[in-house]
Amino acid sequence: MTEVLALEGVTREYPGGVTGLADVSLTVARGELLAIVGPSGSGKSTLLNIMGTLDLPTRGTVRIAGKDVTRLSDRRLSDLRGARIGFVFQQFHLIEGLSAVENVATGLLYVGVPRRRRRLMAEAALERVGLGPRLRHLPHQLSGGEKQRVAIARAVVNTPDLILADEPTGALDTATGQDVLQLLTELHRDGSTIAVITHDRDIAASLPRQITVRDGRLIGDVR
């Protein structure tokens, strides 16, 4: 299978002798749906930041779609992140003064999509996640589950190589969280490559692959 992401011997150290990750190697193939699971302080967030190129390792190699990101300039790294990676966060991170369709379209501005095309792509992404009737609603007019669907639409609108979902059900009730997981599963069936970062072992167990992180080390990889 085609490699989307590869970490080889990745270590991330911080001032004061703090190690966030220690010698982590991990490969994600195109079309996978996996969980990265561990308790608070295990290194999940550091791993997310490295996988998403929001941070770079102290040592080791990170490849996205075959490109070694540790060798890229800030500009080229930003361009790669915008084109190749979609993010879904626990707290949605929607812009309050913009409608659902405008929130989704905004991300396309930074990858050079023309204005008219941005609108059409955003509408199609919202239709895909079941929010066709809510295109013009502002965030405060949407439920928590609907806000997360907007965030997912924003993540998938540019058909990225990899979607990173950081605790995507953390701010939702159980039933709504299950709906969001079902949506991610449907997007996976349609071809998306998705990594769900979570502390919830039940969520992790429901996905085809579970990677367990503890004390900055990868201690389990079960398919």
Image: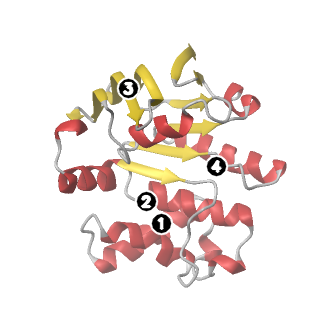
Residue position for label 2: 157
Real-space Cα distance between discs 2 and 3? 32 Å
Spatial CA distance of label 3 from label 1 is 40 Å
Q: Earlier in the sequence, mark 2 or mark 1?
A: 1
Q: Which residue is mark 1?
A: 124
203 relative to 93, above or below: above
Spatial distance from mark 3 to mark 4, Cα to Cα? 26 Å
Report x, y in % for residue 155. Answer: 47, 56
First in sequence: mark 3 vs mark 4: 3
Q: Residues within 10 Å of mark 4 (few under 14, many from 20)?
A: many
Residue in the image at 31% along x and 79% along y: 115
Vertical placement of 148 versus 7: above or below? below
Pick whichever of labels 1 and 4 is earlier in the sequence.
Answer: 1
Q: Quadrant of the N terminus?
A: top left
Kind of residue at disc 4: Pro
**Pointer 1 local density, CA inside 10 Å: few below 14, some 14–19, many at least 20:** some
Give the percent coordinates (x, y) of residue 163.
Answer: 46, 45
Q: Amino acid at mark 2?
A: Val
Q: Which residue is mark 4?
A: 168
- Colouring scheme, one of rainbow, by chain, secondary structure, one colour: secondary structure
Q: Nearer the viewer, residue 113 or 215?
A: 215
